[in-house]
Image (cartoon, rainbow, N blue to C red):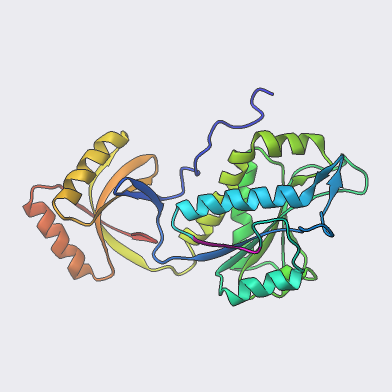
Amino acid sequence: MDGFCQTQTTLPSHIVVREQYGREVFVLAETKKVILDAGHGGTTDPGAVYQGRQEKNDNLRMALAVGQILNDHGVDVGYTRVQDVYQSPLQKAQMANNWDADYFVSFHRNAMPVPGTASGTESLIFSKGGEAERLPANINTELGQAGWTDLGSIERPGLIVLRETEMPAVLVEVGFLDNEADNQRFDECFEHTAQAIAGGILMTLQSPEGQQEYYQIQVGAYAEKDLAQGLLSQLQAAGYPAFLVYQDGLYKVRVGAYLNLDNAAWMEKTLRAAGYPTLLVQEPAVY
């Protein structure tokens, strides 16, 4: 179907990434641990079933895809399962707690008593407020921009994986398994959907409340990546701790990330003496 999937298959443009030594890396002040849970599993718990399609398989496929994207952008990713096995909801929560995860994201597909009567994505949370609400809000926003109908966030304090986890947790219902249109979107727009969920998680990791800001020296900003890459390579060859940030539609070449303004000022002076134009910026969650 024309226009069924948006053409974008990369992270949203407002996700800040840097490139160093040829690898694009998500910008974080410190490594975060996210545990991904593929709901249901094993021979005794297939989850929802519709015309032979089993929810447990869709859940695992999506969890692994989102996990790969997060891992590629510097996030420490763990899984409750990577095969078709069963764990109780309490076991899943305990795995997250034992791993000391920063966030818990559980993947599911929805279903209705009467097939085909509902469509869209929604997030289930223990209670609203703070990080526990911001995580699903970011995921919901990205899924909505990816073309899914956003059904919002619902409090479900009785769910064990939300009640027993000791970190912000969300259960994401990625469309209705008993809705043909939702299944078509899940299959045909799978990569875009995974990117949207990963983007929502990365947004949450990137700008937590009260995150430390760092001083960086910007020496160039380009619309063309090749131009920025050339300057980046030149700086790195000269021994500068340079990196590339894609932000607001521009490739920005920066050097250093300092908590101490005096150290940043010294680096800026050094760069100017070497003939580089400089701009001192202060931003959170940077390399």
The residue shown at (36%, 59%) is 286
Quadrant in which the C terminus appears: bottom left
In this rendering, position of residue 130 left or right of residue 203? right
User: In the rendered image of this protein, does residue 114 appear above or below residue 200?
Assistant: above
What range of the chain is rendered magenta?
Answer: 76-80
User: In the rendered image of this protein, does residue 113 appear above or below residue 147?
Assistant: below
In this rendering, position of residue 94 left or right of residue 7? right
Relative to the observer, which residue lies in front, 52 or 48?
52
Quadrant in which the N terminus appears: top right
In this view of the protein, can residue 282 be seen by the observer? yes
Percent across and percent down for residue 284 are 38, 62
The residue shown at (13%, 51%) is 238
Examine the image and state in which quarter residue 78 appears: bottom right
The residue shown at (87%, 39%) is 51
Percent across and percent down for residue 85 are 73, 60
User: In the rendered image of this protein, does residue 44 appear above or below residue 62?
Assistant: below
